[in-house]
Image (spheres, rainbow, N blue to C red):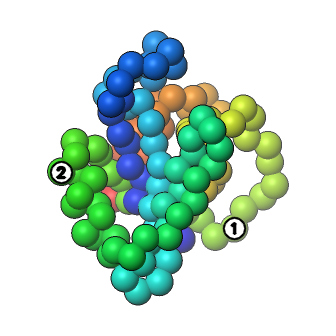
Amino acid sequence: MRWAVVFAPADRWVWFNLFTGRKYAHIFAMTEAAEGKIMVVDPLLTGLDVRIYDTGLAKEMREQIDHGRKIIVVDAPEERKPRLYGVYTCVTVIKSLLYVRAWWVITPKQLYNHLTRKQWAE
């Protein structure tokens, strides 16, 4: 499955910005759900927010970039083995979607760097 992973800067300071920094404070993912619709998976502190929107993926990606966010498009592997992901954070949820097995990646910035070094990132 192809995912557009969105890296968002902090819009306000919160305690975990001490670990994430302000430039890469949060991540979420988008994928095409059907023609003209996208599914957004947004791991929030209050829980996992999954929504379907009536917009095309390319249009939404342009909008996210216009808001100062970075995007990496990733093809997640089809075959997966069971495993534990650890503490619930936006990073662990997106790593789970993409099947990233890098245990040392714990912040959005580290995931951004990891994905930009991988061959399967566009």
6 with respect to 99 (left or right): left
The image position of residue 38, as x and y in percent, is 44, 72
Q: Residue at x 51, y 19 (%)?
A: 16
For mark 1, give the secondary structure: loop
**On screen, residue 105 above or below 99:** above
The image position of residue 85, as x and y in percent, is 73, 41
* Quarter in which the N terminus is drawn: bottom right
Q: Residue furthest left?
A: 66
Q: Which residue is mark 1?
A: 79
- For marks 2 and 1, the one nearer the N-term is 2
40 with respect to 87 (left or right): left
The residue carrying pointer 1 sits among few (fewer than 14), some (14 to 19) or many (20 or more) residues within 10 Å by Cα, namely few
Q: Residue at x 69, y 36 (%)?
A: 88
From the viewer's side, name the closer residue of 82 and 42.
Answer: 42
Q: Residue at x 50, y 15 (%)?
A: 15
Q: Residue at x 32, y 51 (%)?
A: 71
23 with respect to 105 (left or right): left
The image position of residue 4, as x and y in percent, is 40, 59
Q: Quadrant of residue 104?
A: top right
Q: Amino acid at mark 1?
A: Glu
From the viewer's side, name the closer residue of 59 and 94.
Answer: 59
From the viewer's side, name the closer residue of 113 and 22.
Answer: 22
Q: Quadrant of residue 103?
A: top right
Q: Identify the mark at residue 66; answer none if there is no mark.
A: 2
Residue 30 appears in the figure: yes
Q: Amino acid at mark 2?
A: Asp
